[in-house]
Structures are given as structure tokens and as C-alpha cells.
Image (tube, rainbow, N blue to C red):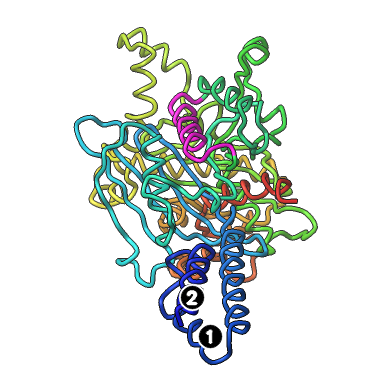
Amino acid sequence: ARQIWVVYLLMSAAAVAHCGAATTRWSRSSRWFAAVVRNGWRCAAQELNLRALSCVNVSSTSAQSSHQQKILVINAGSSSLKYKVFSIRTDDSLVAEMEGDVVKIGDPSQSAVHSHRDLTAVDDASGRSSNELKVVGHDDAIRAALRAIKPKRSSHADYEVPTTQFRAVGHRVVHGGERFSESVVVDDVAEAAIEKLCDLAPLHNSNNLSGIRAARHALGARVPQVAVFDTAFHATLPRKSYLYALPRELYDQLKVRRYGMHGTSYRYVAQELHRLGFGRQPSRGVNAIVLHLGAGSSMCCIRDGKSLDTTMGMTPLEGLVMSTRSGDIDPGVLTFLAQHKGLDFESIDTMLNKKSGLHGLCGSGDLRVVLERADKGDQNAVDAYELLVHRVRKYLGAFLVELEGQLDAVVFTAGMGENSARLRSDVLAGLDSKFQIALDLDKNALASKEIEKQGWSEVQTTGFETKIVVMRTDEELQIARETLRVTAPARK
């Protein structure tokens, strides 16, 4: 009996070493001991060996299944960091699992707030959480996000992150200049190149770069970091679409030209249109005019799935009337203001980016407020809304000509484009007889319900070939797709 107990303890210790204290419990040891009594030493040893092997296999399988099986998407701003986690299925499709943000980063007067939501939770309330924390910079914000992402049953300490669960991290980078026409894995050379492009987007690229550096520092070299550029989709613009009529040396020396923005959103929409079969020639990409109407608004003319023209230019200022940005303006106005109002470059930049657009015209950059005031007879609000619609229609006509009438779909997306049936109706008014673009008012009014079900809704009048689509864009998913695509060769 004494020998039995000694061997029992030794074998139990071996089981603990193989399986871990969390998986080797007294009940298992009791079953092994019962086997000793019933079947003798050989059968009991065989059972224990099988159990130990089983535990090792489960551990190995678990590590293998979790090894780089998630894509983390990061969008780093000046005082915020947004993130979203996608799991990778066996067919390489992506499913959102968690999202969150850290706001008020680096504000010494108050604590940062970290909010995150488990998208797999049974109900929305149970999946949400929020807490205050001390965040000095993006490094702290990244660590806070990674702690929230860490599996609940992870054996890692609170300050550690099991990096093997990530296949890669995708980062939104606003400006890739001419240097980056595709998404890239970030190494030291790419990081230095992105830093050189900060002059083209000083309000964005430097913050995006901070997010990249923080993630590289937190996760190490084993987890690839991928930069996905907003400008990359517009790399197909022809020279006549991107050159400015300025002295040639400004382009040759400083690369002053039109680059376009919102490319990640446009790429997502173009791919979804093709997937859904909205193109008249299935073997080619779609011909579409996409209206990305949000706080920052732009339009894109897409031919065969590629960007042919767009409204934003070297910076996000050019083009449409936006919430706080002016859009197109005679450059002579700026020299006039400098001479007569004594405005310096910084003041002019602030005015054009933060004090113009709908806000500058009527005091609010929120379209809902603008429409409410317009309906009550506020002339400033009426002017603001009519100017917004006029500018959109102006570019819509130009893009129709560029496509020579070969148009498969008109697509509305982003905050205002997706949610304002009235804006869609006013933009497309009167285009049915001449251009065969006819909006069904009933479908248009009910579009939001369809979007909740499937992410998009057709709202054209039956019998008209040109589709009118309201679509919820998903830039985070597109960044994840790009990240998966770029890092795919590493898996082969």
C-alpha cells in the first residue's frame, strides 16, 4: 500500500508538470488511483500516459490555434487611440470580436478614459466596460488596449500580453505620398519613410506613426506591423487628375500634387460592389461614383474598380463643403485676407480647417442641426445646406462625364451619406429622365432598416439600370483585410 501511494504521488506530480495545475485536478488523480485498484499498475500507467499526452496535445493545439489568429487594427489620433480585433477563420474571412478606444491621451488636467466592447457578448450591456486610467502617451494607450484584448483565462500577468494570439497589427496611415502605393509591412526603412511624409499630413501621419511605434515596442518583432494608407487607393489616378497647374519644379522638388483621401473606405465599397454583383461586366471592376459624406467629405470616380478621380487634393481641404472645412476656394481669397485682415499662415490654416464649412456658414457642423434650423427659416442654415448639395451635384456631373455615362452605381456612405435620406434625395433630384438615375423615395426612407440587416440597401426605382446603393463603410475591416493580404506570404 505504501508503494502504491508513493508512485501515486509521483505520477500525480508528473501529470501536474505536463498539464498544469489548472487542468490536473483531484478528481483525475482519484480516477487514476481507482484504475490502480481495479486494473493493476500497467493499465493505470497507460491511462496516465494517455492523459498526459492528451494534455500536451490540447496545449499544443490551443497554442497553434491561437498563434497569430487575430488581426488587431489601430487608428491612432493626436489624443485618442481606436482599436478593433478580428478573428481569422479557416477560410481567411474575418469576424470582429472586440473594439475600443482610449481618449484624452496626454491631457495632464484629467485622466484618460478607456472604453471597450466585446462584440461577441450575448447582449450589448454586458459586453461594454469603461474605466479611467493615467495615460501619458500612445505607449500607455496600446498597453491598456492589449490588456483588454488579453484572453480572460490567460496565464500571463496583467502587464504581459500573449503575443502569439496576433498574426499582425494593421495601422491606418493617412498619407503615403508617392512613396507608398500599397500597404506595407513596417520595418525601420518604412518607418523612416512614413516620418518623412509627415509634412504632407502633419495633423495625422505623426500620430499614426506614434501608434506604429508603440505597437512595435509592445509586441516586439515577431508580430508584423502593417501600414495601410488612405492615399494608396488613389495611386491609379492619371496625371491629368493629380497634377496642379503650378510651376513644374513644385511637383518635381516637393511632390505638390493631388493625392486624395478616404481611400480605404473607397476600396472597401468598390470590393463590396463587385462581390455583390453590381457591375454590368462581372469580369471587371465596377464603374461607380461613391459619395463619402461625413464630417470630412469627399467623392470618388471609380472605373473598373480603380480610382479615376477624386475631390480631395494634396490635403483633405479640397473639394466638398464639409463640417468645418471649406472645400474648394479661390486661392486669391487667402492673399486678400492676409493683406486686409492681417492673418498669418497659422490663422488661415485654422480658419480653413476648423472654422469654415457648415460650421462657418451657420454656426453648426452637424447636418441634423443645420436641417432643423433651415426648416425653421434660418437663412444661414439654408445657405449652408444648399451650398453643400450644390457642390456635391457639381462633382457628380463632372464624374458622370468622366465615365462617359458608363455608370453601374451611385453609392452613399459615411455618416451623412448613410443616415440622411433627405440629403440623398436632394442630391439626386431631377436625374431620372436624362441620366437614368432614379431614386425610389419609399426605399430611400427605409434604407436604414436594410442596412442594419445586411450593411447595404438598394434604393433605385425598379426598372432603372443604374443602381443607387446606401452602404455602411467599414474601414477597420478593410484595414484588417489588407493586413491579412500583405502578411499572407509569411504563412506559406
Residue 363 within the segment the image draws in magenta? no
Residue 228 in view of the camera? no
For mark 1, what is the residue? 36
In the image, 309: left or right of 170?
A: right
Secondary structure predominantly adopted by residues drawn in magenta: helix
> Mark 2: which secondary structure?
helix
The residues tagged by marks 2 and 1 sit, at their Cα atoms, a distance apart of 9 Å
Q: Which residue is mark 2?
A: 8
Is residue 340 depicted above or below 174 in this figure? above
Q: Which residues are magenta?
A: 201-221
Residue 159 figure quarter:
top left
Q: Amino acid at mark 1?
A: Val
Q: Work out whether 175 lies above or below 394.
A: above
Is residue 100 found left or right of 381 in the rendered image? right
Is residue 278 or residue 86 the one in the foreground?
86
Which residue in the rendered view is the most extreme toward the right?
Answer: 283
Depth check: give the residue in front, 181 or 416.
181
- Say which residue appears at 61% left-offset and 64% top-offset: 61
Q: How busy is the neighbourhood of tag 1: few (under 14 within 10 Å), some, or many (20 plus)?
A: some
To which quarter of the image does residue 254 belong?
Answer: top right
